[in-house]
Amino acid sequence: MAPAQSLKPVADAVQPSRPIAPDVRIGHVHLKVADLDRALGFYCGVLGFQVMQRYGADAAFVSAGGYHHHIGLNTWESRGGSPPPPRSTGLFHTAILYPTRAALADALRRVIAAGIALDGASDHGVSEALYLRDPDENGVELYWDRPADLWPRTPTGELAMVTRRLDLDGLLRAE
């Protein structure tokens, strides 16, 4: 997560002349990986996604709940490759939204059981998030959103996100 001081307040941000449709969503992410089986071991074996379709050793499409795919994984330009070096541009992280706090707790249990280290864990007021890396060093955020009526706001009604330490023991007790 970027340091809080680097985030611009909404009033200082560039605003569009006409906003995007409010129901627009990001549908899926497609990642270049060095080893497809290793990537599937993480996304399916650890996080629990299902393989929807596989193209041999070249690509696979995985999903939660039977959707055609939430994550595409391919080796078309990256088989045997290495992660981008630090301080280079590219994807910061893929964020995977869990429907409940209990579902996020289950994800944390899976990550712990697999022996995967967390890069961080934050309470942002609007959400609780876990940060880690996949086997190709792609950043992964696992999070759940609090109900919008509980989001922190300024006295004038603007969103007031924070970055505080997440109580992992408390999260693990969520059911």
Image: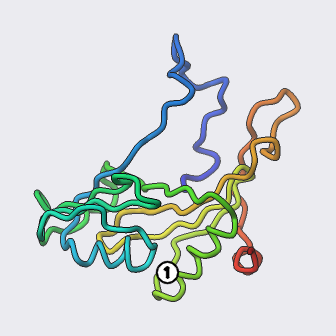
Residue 124: percent from left, percent from top: 69, 54
Q: Quadrant of residue 14?
A: top right
Residue 60: percent from left, percent from top: 23, 63
Q: Which residue is mark 1?
A: 117
Q: Quadrant of residue 59?
A: bottom left
Q: Quadrant of residue 112?
A: bottom right
- Relative to residue 27, is residue 121 depicted above or below? below
Out of 126 and 82, give the one closest to the viewer. 126
Out of 60 and 143, give the one closest to the viewer. 60
Q: Could you tell me which secondary element the residue under label 1 belongs to?
A: loop
Identity of the residue drawn at 65% across and 73% down: 105
Tell whether 80 sits left or right of 39.
Answer: left
Residue 158: percent from left, percent from top: 76, 31
- Relative to residue 125, is residue 112 depicted above or below? below
Tell whether 75 sits left or right of 175.
Answer: left
Residue 82: percent from left, percent from top: 19, 69
